[in-house]
């Protein structure tokens, strides 16, 4: 068990932020989980994640012994874009869930990665999210970083939190966007009427999306997209809200699906970041999936 006494210059910091600051092996997300599971106490009492620490508070951290991951490694073909001893970057196919959850106990990216990396994955993400630093929606394809050890996981999480990872997406939307470039700066929160959906909400979390037109078609626009923040369904919600839903997005486009595809035409094409251990500048790309290319060819021929 670790014990810390809050000093004056740390007063009024949120408990989760304080913990991730004093112990650089615990990310803020991990701190939140430990607090909620009663493994982090303040003066021997459980507190909320948002508790503001006071000078003299005694913070105890008991990190539970990681349970042996009971997930089954599955020999699922996966497109590896880059791999070394610290990270692996894959091109996730559309239709694949990142990690197991209710309704998706297997066949996930984690199951595939476990077969490739064996036991060399960061444990920070917990039993069902080993090595997972960030996520993509089930029906979004493209680049995803997985950490092979805790040091790489902590560093990549910090880069993402500090908006130091540049994520570039390609999307095909319904409608013709007149502006060549635009920024959508609208907060996003969970829908009160449908908890599975996200909506633009003034009380939501800050969300910023930059769009650039790559090509205009008669009824569609091909976009390059960069996001400053990584809110759930951010790109899909923002584009739908301004009237240009992503082709194939059942959730945010009123179910219209002109090309008969399952899942949205949204692809995480490029990632730019510093290698978590060597600090080398990394720039990785994944080509558009075949179904996306075929839709663009059809549009080019009409």
Image (cartoon, grey):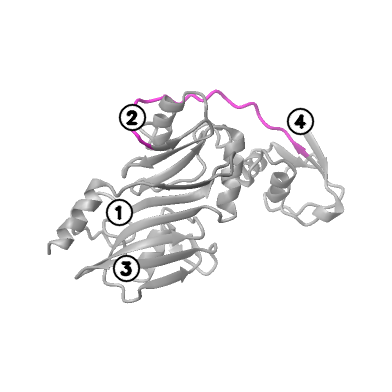
**In the image, is residue 164 part of the stretch drawn in magenta?**
no
Q: Earlier in the sequence, mark 4 or mark 2?
A: 4
**Distance between the alpha carbons at the discs numbered 1 and 2:** 22 Å
Tag on residue 264?
Answer: 1
Give residue 248's quadrant in the image.
bottom left
Quarter the C terminus occupies: bottom left
**Distance between the alpha carbons at the discs numbered 2 and 3:** 35 Å
- The boundaries of the magenta stretch are 60-80
Question: Residue 80, percent across and down?
Answer: 38, 36
Q: Residues within 10 Å of mark 4 (few under 14, many from 20)?
A: few
Quarter the N terminus occupies: top right
Front position among marks 4 and 1: 1
Residue 97 placement, left or right of 28: left
Residue designated by label 2:
76
Front position among marks 4 and 3: 3
Tag on residue 178?
Answer: none
Does residue 183 lie above or below 278 as drawn? below
Give residue 152's quadrant in the image.
top right
Residue designated by label 3:
244
Does residue 13 lie above or below 275 as drawn? below
**In the image, is residue 67 part of the stretch drawn in magenta?**
yes
Question: In terms of secondary structure, where does tag 1 sit?
Answer: loop
């Amino acid at each position: 068990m670790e014990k810390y006494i809050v000093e004056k210059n740390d007063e009024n910091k949120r408990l989760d932020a304080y913990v991730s600051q004093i112990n650089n092996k615990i990310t803020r997300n991990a701190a939140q989980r430990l607090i909620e599971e009663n493994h982090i106490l303040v003066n021997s009492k459980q507190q909320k994640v948002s508790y503001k620490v006071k000078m003299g508070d005694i913070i105890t951290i008991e990190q539970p012994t990681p349970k042996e991951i009971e997930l089954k490694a599955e020999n699922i073909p996966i497109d590896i874009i880059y791999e070394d001893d610290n990270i692996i970057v894959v091109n996730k196919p559309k239709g694949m869930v990142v990690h197991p959850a209710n309704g998706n106990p297997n066949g996930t990216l984690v199951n595939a990665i476990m077969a490739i990396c064996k036991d060399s994955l960061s444990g920070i993400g917990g039993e069902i999210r080993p090595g997972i630093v960030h996520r993509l929606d089930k029906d979004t394809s493209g680049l995803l970083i997985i950490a092979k050890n805790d040091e790489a996981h902590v560093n990549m999480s910090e880069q993402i939190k500090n908006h130091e990872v540049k994520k570039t997406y390609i999307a095909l939307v319904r409608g013709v966007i007149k502006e060549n470039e635009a920024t959508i700066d609208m907060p996003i929160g969970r829908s009160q009427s449908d908890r599975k959906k996200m909506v633009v909400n003034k009380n939501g979390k800050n969300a910023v999306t930059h769009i650039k037109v790559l090509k205009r078609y008669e009824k569609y626009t091909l976009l390059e997209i960069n996001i400053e923040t990584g809110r759930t369904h951010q790109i899909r919600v923002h584009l739908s809200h301004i009237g240009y839903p992503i082709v194939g997005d059942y959730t945010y486009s009123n179910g219209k699906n002109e090309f008969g595809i399952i899942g949205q035409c949204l692809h995480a094409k490029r990632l730019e970041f510093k290698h978590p251990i060597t600090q080398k500048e990394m720039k990785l790309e994944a080509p558009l999936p075949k179904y996306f290319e075929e839709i663009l060819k059809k549009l080019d021929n009409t």
